[in-house]
Amino acid sequence: MPQVRRQQLAAQFREFLAYDCVIDQRTSLAAYECDGLSAYRQQPLLVLLPENIAQVQQIMRLCQQQRLPVVSRGAGTSLSGGALPHADGVVLSLAKMNRILDIDKLARSAVVEPGVRNLAISEAVNSLGLYYAPDPSSQIVCSIGGNVAENAGGVHCLKYGLTLHNILALKVVGSDGEIFEIDQRSMQTSGYDLLPLLVGSEGMLGVVVEVTVKLLPIPQCARVILAVFDSVEKAGDSVAAIIAQGIIPAGIEMMDNPAIRAAEDFVHAGYPVEAEAILICELDGTEAEVESQIARVEGLLMRGGAVETRLAKDEAERLLFWSGRKAAFPAIGRLSPDYYCIDGTIPRKALAAVLAGVRSLSEEYGLAVANVFHAGDGNLHPLILYDANNEGELEKTEELGSRILLLCIHYGGTITGEHGVGIEKLGEMCVQFSEPERNQFHSIRECFDPLKILNPGKAIPTLARCAEFNAMHVHQGQVAFPELDRF
Amino acid sequence: MTAIAELSIEDELREQVFMVAANGGEIQIIGGGSKGFYGEAVEALPIDVSAHSGVIDYDPAELVITLRAGCRLVEVEALLAEQGQMFGFEPPCYGEDATIGGMVATGLAGPRRAWAGGIRDFVLGVKILDGRAEFLRFGGRVIKNVAGFDVSRVMVGELGALGIMLELSIRVVPIFETERTINFEHGQADEHIRWINELGSRPLPLSASLWQQGVSRIRLSGSELGVAHAAQQLGGDSCEHDWAAVKEQDHEFFTGGEAITRVALPPTCADLLDNPGQLIEWSGAQRWLRGDVDIPALRAQVESQGGNVCAFRKHDSAVAVFHPLSPALLTLQRKLKSSFDPAGIFNRGRLYPEL
């Protein structure tokens, strides 16, 4: 039966899409059955690869008519299952819409199609002395359309903002196939601001078909300081001290001992393997600005208890200091058959308490955890090491991950800083948001997509889903983690 | 303020909203009243929310302040300044009584907007009372947060149409070590527009720009060294300039009693207005006119350029204050309004008759 339906639908889509732009063979569909959260897999009915906006509109009209679920997909690097296909639906891949349409040097902006890779934008405007600031770690492959869907961040967002802060306009095909545009180039628009709803909406409010991005002048100079600490508390307090002194680093990253060891074994960046924590602090701006900040930051780090600080003497050493941090995930991947990346954000002052909590949970579950931390903005990435071949270990890992996220909520934070909810954190959404709040999310979704065909089952949990989650985790009105208060 | 008193203000508001919704009435939300002129007139039961005040949490090292919407903007700015911090978007007060809720609801930003971002870029979390008399929280107190649709930022500029804001968490930034204003001669508006946007492509610590009657003024903000270095590169004449007067519209351009029109355009858009009296801010994005203006004709002219026109102050009440929305956007916005406020009780008509 599904095979018959698949063939019928493929024929309908081929009426306006090239033959090759409709994928209906099981072997080829397999490439789309998961995204970066590869533990979850599902074959869609079809994968569609439109080549222009008119085709996206036709696809949406047909899908709406047939009430066919549509999962938009960029490069498929989501870590939360946002692009996991729907068994009875189509995957709408924007990969073929990958042209840079316009670069405006004077306006410092570029108009791009959604399939353009994040890094390709900066590469295309480099000769003009400009770049696109948000730099998620997947920037070599991830697409700007996916960045918009997830409100992607990166290591520089404390100073330069998230995707939302670097978008000037969007052209969107709505669930009914009609186009609407949000143009904020003029900085002052009328009516409700729809941009923050669209950015980070995980493909549930429309299909983004054109993005106007803001470009920034490349900073004249960037210097990096590596600081070594014998406790994570001291490292965390030093970050607070730098920021309280009015300095906003371009990036400030923390790694704990397991992460330092893994990175050093892998890339030999010269990290001190005995240290409990290191901070990598990048300052950028004009030569004069950076010079004036370096001395202050070094002083603050030493006063904050750093055992040692190293200022990268040249560009090669700056990149070396960064190399360990940038390779942290694959480095940890070498230590263990599988790892699972968590994405909570916490008020920075809760760092020591949350890390102590993570350590104790790690012991309780018998699973090692390494931590990398976007220390400037409080975004914590605990990496849980596990082996999916051991029966039940994935489930145990997911439960540990869930408890880490609940810990983040407990300390006033959030369950996702930059990876999105997807299918991964639906349960935790039930804890972070009340029923009326979740209802409001559903209601907003219906404003844009009354038939609920866009990425159904993601990002916002249903009542039933929350009942199920609460039955597992809540007992007599209390979240079943009585130890939380003791952390 | 004690915890009991806080509860009672919120509960009182909730009861009022519940009763009004049940009886088919309408509410006009009043904060400090400083920006009451902004938008269409609303005839409805006034509810003063300015008593709901007080800072809930402010730790300068977190770069976030959480406070009740009735807090007075001048007091909050003084509190931030004590810690060497400020709001990055340089909000206008237009009066001592301006509240944080009003600042967010109007979404008006000051001279630094083009370089630092708007209020929308700094709001992190909100607690509102919606049209069903429910308390709802969205966002949070952290800078990076993608859990759920980003409703807190949608509150910026909604002019009270989606609900009563009760609490807000807003990101703050450090105050600059120093600032300096430099003057340049640019006879024509187009010369200024081209020049200021070319400067934007260079890594300079710009934080404000203004063109009026043949003179361009720019403000540099940053460290002593950085500003001195940039000023040396740029040349021009250093001078004193009262940027606060431009922000607060105490500047002589705004105080003559004439109608004030705000034209928003993509910054690099050429001078369409050909009006020697205009005042241009925000790297070219915000252009002010005073005196009589044919608003419908101007709207037709700027629309194709991606711009919009607001009949900002002292216009004939027959002229729509805000630029008409495209049918597609108006439909979406009407749906959004009723999703937050199904009975249409909050500030109806202040933005558009349909919202």
Image (tube, coloured by chain):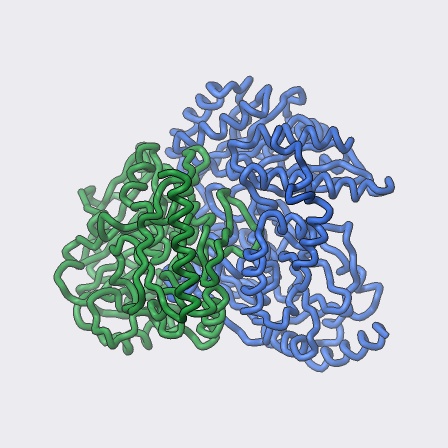
Any part of residue A75 in sight = no
Where residue A174 appears, as percent x and y from the top left, is 57, 71
Where residue A199 appears, as percent x and y from the top left, is 53, 58
Q: Is A170 or A235 nearer to us in this picture?
A: A235
Q: In this view, does B114 lie above or below A244?
A: below
- Please give the name of the residue rendered at 20% of the width and 50% of the height, measured from the top-left corner: B245
Q: Is A66 or A483 nearer to us in this picture?
A: A483
Direction from residue A313 to residue B51 in the image, left or right: left
The image quarter containing residue A440 is bottom right
Instruction: From the rendered image, report the letter of the chain displayed in blue.
Output: A
Q: In this view, does B250 lie above or below A314?
A: below
Any part of residue A143 in sight = yes
- Please give the name of the residue rendered at 44% of the width and 73% of the height, measured from the top-left corner: B330
The image quarter containing residue A477 is top right
Where residue A449 appears, as percent x and y from the top left, is 59, 70
Q: Is residue B119 above or below residue B293?
A: above
Direction from residue A288 to residue A301 in the image, left or right: right
Chain B hue? green
- Please give the name of the residue rendered at 54% of the width and 66% of the height, measured from the top-left corner: A210
